[in-house]
Structure formats: structure tokens, C-alpha cells
Image (cartoon, helix red, strand yellow):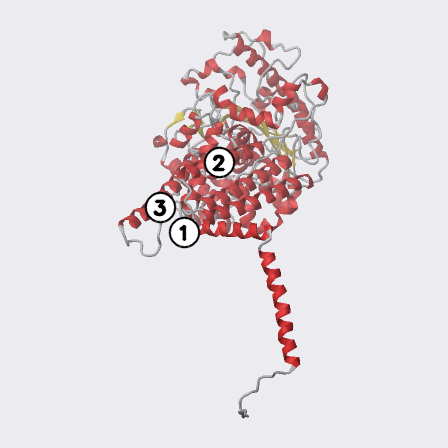
């Protein structure tokens, strides 16, 4: 048989046969090995798991809404407790053995958390529930906007956990919780530096939280894949009108998202507004706003409530004629007027060191209706008032609100011109301002950062003074917990607070250590509430012949003794200033009356009397303004927003257009304030105007010139706080 030469011949050589048999021998063990490997127990188990997971993914059972509700409740509860935990610290004891176990347990972080929850049935204060509901609103917004329950849960958990950890670190470092203005740190592009602020002892907490959140996120994403209910509410972007069911689902989702957003917005927007629905609702559950201390507010009312409370504050309504052209014309008008005023003034403000003293709760108790004394508690200050510019200051509040009066004195802005919902500019306005203007900056412009210094013999976190004073450009704020701390911290007898004598000594040190003029701000603490039997040999127990209840008299007599000690310390302080060979001017004022005159406060006819404190402007004997007493029509009544304008007039010092406006306004409206209801520190109040004789006058009865000045004042205040800052471009704050 012939073979076709074109077709390959099949080899039958021994070598070919050996190759085929070798391949068969190699493939058979591999096949048996692979089969054995696949049938091994671990692989079989993995195969079953993979098959099970595939079947789950294929079937994707829908999680019931009841499960969503249960998870929301658990996660929300955990968030409330984690946030509240961030406000607490384990207490330390000088002698731990002297403290019983029960007390230690109650004061521990666990004990404080337990009390935070249990006060619902122990004290009928539902703060835990309030925070649960407030955070629940945030949770709902995420759920309905994202429409993915497990993704929303992961994001909510991450946000609240990060907030709690950051809050704990800030409380440790500065005794302040996170507030909305802190978010500006990230928006300013400094977020990358955040790790540098974390102390070493907080790194384990941060690392542990990160690990927990990674696992939580993995679990939530896995659940999102497994959950057959891909959307919380059925929704279809494509073909949204394909059938009735789709239309209903789409509408439901949109309505749910819109309502949840509106609810959270409305609650937050109105939380700081007295008598609004959210304010009243929160109060009914035990919320008690503490606008003097964010730390106190967050500890007692919850960090979530504190944050939301400060998230929105309505500053002012925009004046109808507010625009650049209006502000340019206004600046030009007051520039011209200030130039004319300065032609007759020979001095500069910076020629003198100006010491602005806010004397805590200082006022003349003999002016209070119903209080009768046989001894004058303040003879020295009364004598000082007789020989220098002095009078009565209209205070917005009674028993509190110190920083509001302080803010007015440092800025020239009036609380009466802000919206009524603006309760505390130090908490609600200044943290959001980039470069707020304050009068100490006049000295800074000449002497640099050493041109102004501040002292407060208490803690720097009160009213956020630490951060606010930095914005005001004070070179340094010395407090009990500053670094370095305020030097002189002496107390009198059993008093809780640093004495005025010690506070004054800190100012004297600053004067002796400076070779140029300064602006010095001092806020004292000696006469702060409470008023107990702190002082030995209180002669006013016998000198008080008032017909008042014993409890009321007891507090009043203790307070009066403190006033008497302030009177003595102030005279000694001024005598020491008189011995210095440098011109010094002192602006001294009490911020408000104490809230202890309950009998007088019960009579609404006493409202004005209980809002009037004492002030004087005094210069030492080497000053050009020593012994000057301004016309009583100008000085008898005023408010703290006018102090620097009055001081400039008293010192015959040249002024800026801004001070010119304040001077003109004070001439027409000597005192202006928003009076809070009698015996109250915070809340709604009505704008109150006093004439030169201290009589209340309605706005409609103001002269046409006074109304025009008030309109200008409102425009200027709006431009400085909420507006576009047009006046900065027209040298409105520079001396002409």
C-alpha cells in the first residue's frame, strides 16, 4: 500500500509511544490530586459557604422595617452615650482612701453616664431622650436622602464617633466641647494638620475608634449587599412614571427626604429662639440653656444639643437701604464730622494707658427699692464719682449676661440692635467672625501685639473668652488656667473667687512691666454669685435694717460686704495709679445687679432701677484729663457700648468716624439696651431707650435726628457683623 507523500505519516516509533504514555502517567496523578484537593474538608466547607453566599445574593432576602427601627434605636442610643461620655473625666482625689466606694462610683464616668440616663425617671428630666431624638433627626435625614439604610448607618456612626472622640480631646485640652465655628478649621484648609493636635495619651482612643469604624463599615456594606431591600423606599430614576407603584414610591421617597430635612432644619433654626416651637419643646424635656459656658451646657444638656443650639443664630435683619453706595456715603459723612471734631481735640487715645474694668456685679445697693442701710458700703467710689465723669449704666440683664455687656464695651455694638434671638454674641457671633473690630486694636495699631492685654481671674473657657480674645487681637489673656497663669490669685477669707485687690495687682504688674501705653482689659470675679457667709466680721448684718425675709437679707448682706471690699480695693488701686509717672485713664463699671433682690424684682415698676449699675471714668494726676467732669446731660446715663466714645470725649482725644457716630448717637440717645425681663439673665427683651434724665422713651417719640442716627447705627452694626464689611475700605475705624 502506497503512502501519500503530502499527508503526514503517523509515527509508530518507540520514542513516540513513550512520550504518549509519559503524558498519560503525568496527567492521571494531577487529576487524582486535584480531585482529592477539591474533596478535602476545608475546601468543601469553603465551597459550601460560597454556594450559600451566592444563593443569598441571588435571593437577597429583604430586611424588615422593624429590624431597621431596632438598629436605628440601638445605634442612636450608643451615639448619645458616646457623645455624653466625651464630656466626662474620671475624678481625682487628694486622698482616695478618704472617699467611700459609693461616692467614687457615682462620680466615675460610668456613674455620671448612669445618672444622665436615669434622671429621666429619678428627676423627670428627659435630656437623654431629647438628645436621642435630636440625633435621630440627623439619622433620618441620612436614611431618607441616601435611601440606603446600611450606608446611612455607617455614615451616621462614623460622624458621631469622630465627633465624640474629637470632643473628648478638645475637652481634655481646653475644657470646651466642639462647636459649629470649629468646622471652619477644616474649611480653611487646615484639616490636614488635625493629627498634630492629638495628644499622645489620646492616640489609643483614636486608633481604637478607627479600627472599630473600619469593621463597622465593612459589616454595614456587607449587609447592604445582602439586604434584598436595596432601597429603604422603592425609587426609580429611570422611567419614573412607568406604573402607579413606581410613581407612589418615588413621591414617597421625595416627601420623606424633604420632611426629614425640614424637620431638622426647623428644629436647629429655632432652637436658640425664645418661645419658638423647638425651644419650648426642648425646655419641656428638661433642656436648660447655659449660654455662659459651652462646657457646662454640653455636660448638662448634651453635646448634640449644645452644638445644634449654636449652629444658627440670627444676627440682624438686613436694613432695606444697605448697599455699598449707602455705606460709602455714610462713611464720608462721619469722616467729615470726625475731622471737624478732631480740630478742637489736642490729644490721642494712645497717649494714655486705658484700663477698662468690668467689676463683677458691682452696683450701689442703696439704690435698690426696699434696701435700707445705716452704713454706706461704697463711700470711696461715691466720692470718686463726685469728682470725675460718672453716672449710671443701663444694663441688659440682672444676675448674669456679663459677656454681653463686655462685648458692647469692647466693640461699641449694641445688643438692642441685634435680633432678639441673639442671646450671647460671644458664643453665637464672634466665633463666626473672621476679624471682629474692638477698641483695643487702636493701641495695637501703634504698639503691635503688646498694645493690649487682658486679665480675668477665672477660667478662660467661660464665654469662649480664650478664642474670642485672640480674635480681638489681645496680646495675651491671663486667667487661672492660662499659660502662664494669672500671677495674683489671693482670696479673702472663705470667698470662692480671687479678690479684687489681687486682680488689681495683676494690672499694676502689667503697668510696671511696660514702657509704653496700653489698653488693659480686666474682668473681676470677687462679687460673683453665690452670696454666702464668706467674709469674717460682716458689719452689714447689723447695718441692714431692710424689712425683708431673712433668706433674702442674708444673701444681700453677704453681697454688700463684697461691695464694701471692692470699694476699699478700688480706692487703693487708684491711689497707686496716681503715684505713677505715666498718664492712665480708668473706665470702671459694674456689669449688672445680682439676682438676689427678689422682693424688688417682683414689682415691675422697679425694672429700670434694677438694670442700672454704677460707672466712672477717671484719670491719674499726670494725665491731661485729670479731674475732668463731663456735662451731666452727657454722662448721667449711658450704656456700655458708649464707654469708649465717652472716654475719648473725657480725654479730649481725637476719634475715628466710628467713634464720632457713637458720640453723636449717645448725645441723642444717652442709653440704649435690650432689657431682659426683671431678675433674668437671658431671654427676649425689648429695646429700651433712656433720655438724659434717665426716663424711658419710646422709639416713636425719639427726635428725627435721633431716629436718623439710630438708622445709621443699625447700618454700621450690620456691616460690621453680617454685612460685607464695606466700611473697612473707607478707613471708618481709623482716627482722622
* x and y, in percent, of residue 492 in the image: 68, 19
Between disc 1 and disc 2, whose residue precedes? 2
475 to the left or right of 304: right
**Residue 408 shows up from this direction:** no
Which corner quadrant holds the N terminus?
Answer: bottom right
579 to the left or right of 164: right
Secondary structure category for the residue under label 1: helix
Residue 543 higher or lower than 172, as above or below: above
* x and y, in percent, of residue 237 in the image: 35, 54
Residue on which the image places disc 1 = 325
Asked whether the beta carbons under mark 1 and mark 2 sit within 8 Å of each other, the answer is: no
Identify the residue shown where x is 52% and y is 23%.
Answer: 118
Between disc 3 and disc 2, whose residue precedes? 2
**Residue 568 shows up from this direction:** yes
**In terms of image quadrants, where is residue 278?**
top left
Residue on which the image places disc 3 = 253
Measure the C-alpha gap from mark 1 to mark 2. Answer: 51 Å
Given residues 662 and 510, the one toward you in this image is 510
Residue on which the image places disc 2 = 76
**In terms of image quadrants, where is residue 8?**
bottom right
Between disc 1 and disc 3, whose residue precedes? 3
Measure the C-alpha gap from mark 1 to mark 3. Answer: 47 Å
Measure the C-alpha gap from mark 3 to mark 2. Answer: 22 Å
Amino acid at each position: 500500500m502506497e503512502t501519500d507523500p503530502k499527508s503526514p505519516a503517523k509515527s509508530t516509533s518507540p520514542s513516540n509511544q513513550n512520550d504518549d504514555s509519559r503524558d498519560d502517567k503525568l496527567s492521571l496523578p494531577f487529576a487524582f490530586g486535584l480531585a482529592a484537593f477539591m474533596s478535602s474538608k476545608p475546601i468543601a466547607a469553603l465551597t459550601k459557604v460560597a454556594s450559600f453566599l451566592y444563593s443569598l445574593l441571588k435571593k437577597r432576602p429583604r430586611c424588615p422595617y422593624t429590624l431597621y427601627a431596632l438598629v436605628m434605636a440601638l445605634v442612636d442610643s450608643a451615639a448619645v452615650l458616646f457623645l455624653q461620655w466625651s464630656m466626662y473625666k474620671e475624678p481625682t482625689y487628694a486622698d482616695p482612701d478618704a472617699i467611700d466606694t459609693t461616692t467614687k462610683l457615682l462620680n466615675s464616668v460610668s456613674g455620671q453616664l448612669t445618672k444622665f440616663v436615669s434622671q429621666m425617671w429619678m428627676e423627670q428630666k428627659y435630656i437623654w431622650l431629647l438628645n436621642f431624638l435630636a440625633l435621630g433627626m440627623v439619622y433620618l435625614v441620612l436614611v431618607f436622602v441616601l435611601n440606603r439604610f446600611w450606608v446611612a448607618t455607617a455614615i451616621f456612626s462614623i460622624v458621631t464617633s469622630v465627633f465624640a472622640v474629637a470632643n473628648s480631646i478638645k475637652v481634655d485640652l481646653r475644657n470646651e466641647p466642639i462647636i459649629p465655628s470649629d468646622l471652619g478649621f477644616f474649611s480653611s484648609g487646615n484639616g490636614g494638620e488635625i493629627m498634630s493636635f492629638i495628644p499622645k495619651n489620646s492616640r489609643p482612643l483614636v486608633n481604637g475608634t478607627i479600627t472599630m469604624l473600619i469593621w463597622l463599615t465593612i459589616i454595614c456594606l456587607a449587609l447592604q449587599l445582602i439586604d434584598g431591600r436595596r432601597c429603604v423606599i422603592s425609587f426609580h430614576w429611570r422611567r419614573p412614571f412607568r406604573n402607579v407603584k413606581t410613581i407612589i414610591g418615588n413621591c414617597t421617597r421625595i416627601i420623606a427626604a424633604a420632611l426629614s430635612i425640614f424637620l431638622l432644619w426647623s428644629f436647629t433654626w429655632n432652637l436658640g429662639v425664645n418661645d419658638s416651637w423647638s425651644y419650648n419643646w426642648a425646655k419641656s424635656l428638661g433642656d436648660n440653656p447655659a449660654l455662659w459656658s459651652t462646657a457646662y451646657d454640653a455636660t448638662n444638656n448634651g453635646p448634640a444639643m449644645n452644638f445644634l443650639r449654636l449652629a444658627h443664630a440670627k444676627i440682624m435683619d438686613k436694613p432695606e437701604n444697605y448697599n455699598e453706595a449707602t455705606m460709602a456715603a455714610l462713611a464720608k459723612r462721619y469722616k467729615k464730622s470726625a475731622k471737624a471734631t478732631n480740630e478742637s481735640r489736642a490729644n490721642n487715645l494712645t497717649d494714655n494707658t486705658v484700663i477698662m474694668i468690668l467689676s463683677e456685679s458691682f452696683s450701689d445697693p442703696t439704690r435698690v427699692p426696699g434696701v435700707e442701710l445705716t452704713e454706706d458700703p461704697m463711700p470711696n467710689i461715691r466720692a470718686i464719682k463726685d469728682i470725675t465723669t460718672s453716672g449710671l449704666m443701663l444694663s441688659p440683664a440682672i444676675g448674669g449676661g456679663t459677656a454681653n455687656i463686655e462685648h458692647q464695651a469692647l466693640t461699641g455694638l449694641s445688643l438692642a440692635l441685634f435680633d432678639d434671638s441673639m442671646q450671647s454674641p460671644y458664643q453665637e457671633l464672634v466665633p463666626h467672625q473672621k476679624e471682629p473690630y474692638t477698641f483695643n486694636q487702636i493701641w495695637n495699631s501703634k504698639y503691635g501685639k503688646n498694645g493690649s492685654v487682658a486679665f480675668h481671674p477665672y477660667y478662660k473657657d467661660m464665654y469662649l473668652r480664650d478664642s474670642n480674645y485672640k480674635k480681638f487681637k489681645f496680646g495675651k489673656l491671663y486667667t487661672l488656667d492660662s499659660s502662664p497663669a494669672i500671677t495674683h490669685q489671693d482670696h479673702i477669707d472663705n470667698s470662692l473667687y480671687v479678690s479684687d485687690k489681687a486682680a488689681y495687682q495683676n494690672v499694676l504688674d502689667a503697668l510696671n512691666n511696660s514702657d509704653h501705653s496700653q489698653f488693659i482689659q480686666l474682668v473681676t470675679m470677687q462679687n460673683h454669685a453665690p452670696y454666702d457667709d464668706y467674709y469674717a466680721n460682716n458689719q452689714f448684718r447689723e447695718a441692714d435694717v431692710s424689712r425683708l425675709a431673712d433668706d433674702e437679707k442674708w444673701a444681700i448682706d453677704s453681697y454688700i460686704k463684697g461691695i464694701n471690699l471692692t470699694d476699699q480695693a478700688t480706692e487703693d488701686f487708684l491711689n497707686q495709679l496716681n503715684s505713677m509717672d505715666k498718664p492712665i485713664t480708668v473706665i470702671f463699671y459694674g456689669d449688672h445687679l445680682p439676682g438676689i433682690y427678689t422682693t424688688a424684682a417682683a414689682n415691675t415698676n422697679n425694672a429700670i432701677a434694677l438694670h442700672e449699675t454704677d460707672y466712672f471714668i477717671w484719670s491719674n494726676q499726670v494725665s491731661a484729663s485729670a479731674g475732668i467732669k463731663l456735662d451731666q446731660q452727657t454722662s448721667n446715663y449711658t450704656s456700655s457700648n458708649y464707654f469708649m466714645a465717652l472716654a475719648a470725649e473725657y480725654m479730649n482725644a481725637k476719634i475715628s468716624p466710628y467713634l464720632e457716630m457713637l458720640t453723636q448717637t449717645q448725645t441723642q440717645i444717652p442709653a440704649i439696651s435690650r432689657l431682659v425681663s426683671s431678675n433674668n439673665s437671658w431671654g427676649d427683651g425689648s429695646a429700651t431707650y433712656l433720655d438724659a434724665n434717665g426716663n424711658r422713651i419710646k422709639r416713636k417719640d425719639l427726635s428725627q435726628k435721633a431716629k436718623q442716627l439710630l438708622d445709621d447705627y443699625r447700618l454700621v452694626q450690620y456691616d460690621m457683623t453680617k454685612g460685607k464689611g464695606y466700611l473697612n475700605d473707607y478707613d471708618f475705624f481709623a482716627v482722622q
